[in-house]
């Protein structure tokens, strides 16, 4: 059976399962959610551009790049659904926009710890950016050792005939913090372990987080010494 045939069968099954009104409601929801996701993509572009501009200007004046990499992600429909259920929220677009502030995410990986705060300050000083929430997991790491600076910001996007304010989650971290978070994220899903092994792994991960924090401090100190001498 080719793709076209299986799509046709699915469509017929859906037609039998729902009345016309439900199908139309679903189509309307689908069209508006595509529109909303497109707006989040535009907001990601705005925020990324702001960081690229800051990187360009800083490298011109200081001869080095404070940003190592910039990544972005749009939350998947499955993650949105799970979060709505977790927070006991209805499956509506307004519930998504008003309550889930991490649909659009931009992660900025910095060379040195000081660059994180410098870039965050530069972003927040811009007159079209509004800070909604700040979580400083660098000064106050999570119990497992996770470190990063999280900002929820609101940024305007200019569409054909309207301006919309969109929320974006910005995560700023160093290369060492990124290294730890990526590996911890992978290991978190290995759940079929005994409680003793799990406790041991958590302790090891926490120790690795401390080592990565020490590495950041040492690298920062080396840079400060070079800049003082140079
Ligand atoms: P993904 O796939 O990265 O999007 P809230 O959004 O406020 O309801 P929470 O957990 O309080 O929920 O938000 P918080 O603390 O700001 O963390 C949100 C994101 O930070 C997570 O997104 C992760 O990307 C990252 N993060 C937070 N804690 C940890 C951690 O312990 N380890 C790692 N590796 N990453 C972490 P999501 O939605 O979980 O996933």
Image (cartoon, rainbow, N blue to C red):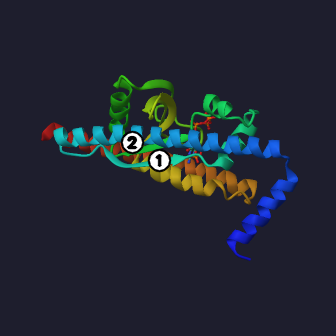
Pick the residue in front: 148 or 7.
Answer: 7
Q: Is residue 43 left or right of residue 220?
A: right
Residue 37: quadrant of the picture: top right
Are the residues tagged 1 and 2 within 8 Å (C-beta)? yes
**In the image, residue 25 lies at what x, y percent?**
75, 40
**In the image, residue 55 lies at what x, y percent?**
28, 42
The quarter of the rendered structure image containing the N terminus is bottom right
Residue identifier under label 1: 72
Which residue is rendered at x = 40% and y = 50% of the image? 175
Ligand 1 occupies quarter: top right
Image vertical order of residue 162 relative to residue 58, above or below: above
Q: Residue furthest front?
A: 20
The mark nearer the N terminus, 1 or 2, is 2
Q: Is residue 136 visible?
A: no
Residue identifier under label 2: 48
Image vertical order of residue 7 relative to residue 69, above or below: below
Pick the residue in front: 145 or 133.
Answer: 133
Which residue is rendered at x = 42% and y = 42% of the image? 45
Q: Is residue 189 left or right of residue 138?
A: right
**Disc 2 crowd, CA 10 A, few/some/many (<14, 14-19, 20+):** some
**Disc 1 crowd, CA 10 A, few/some/many (<14, 14-19, 20+):** some
**In the image, residue 39 lies at what x, y percent?**
51, 38
User: Residue 175: which numbered mark, if any?
Assistant: none
Q: Is residue 108 visible?
A: yes
**In the image, residue 163 lies at what x, y percent?**
46, 28
Q: Residue furthest left?
A: 230
Residue 223: quadrant of the picture: top left
């Amino acid at each position: 059976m080719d793709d076209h045939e299986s799509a046709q069968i699915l469509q017929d099954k859906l037609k039998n399962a729902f009345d016309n009104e439900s199908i139309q409601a679903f189509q309307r929801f689908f069209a508006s959610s595509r529109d909303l996701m497109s707006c989040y993509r535009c907001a990601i572009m705005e925020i990324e551009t702001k960081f690229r501009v800051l990187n360009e200007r800083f490298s011109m004046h200081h001869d080095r790049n404070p940003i190592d990499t910039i990544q972005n992600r749009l939350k998947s429909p499955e993650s949105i659904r799970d979060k709505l259920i977790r927070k006991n929220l209805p499956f509506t677009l307004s519930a998504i926009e008003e309550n889930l502030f991490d649909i659009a995410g931009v992660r900025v990986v910095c060379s040195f710890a000081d660059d994180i705060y410098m870039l965050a300050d530069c972003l927040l000083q811009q007159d079209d950016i509004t800070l909604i929430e700040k979580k400083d997991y660098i000064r106050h790491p999570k119990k497992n050792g996770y470190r990063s600076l999280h900002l929820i910001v609101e940024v305007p996007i200019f569409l054909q005939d309207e301006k919309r304010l969109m929320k974006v989650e910005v995560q700023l971290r160093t290369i060492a913090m990124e290294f730890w978070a990526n590996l911890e994220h992978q290991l978190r899903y290995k759940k079929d372990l005994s409680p003793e092994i799990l406790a041991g792994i958590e302790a090891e991960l926490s120790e690795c987080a401390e080592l990565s924090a020490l590495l950041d401090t040492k690298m920062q100190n080396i840079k400060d010494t070079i800049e003082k001498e140079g």
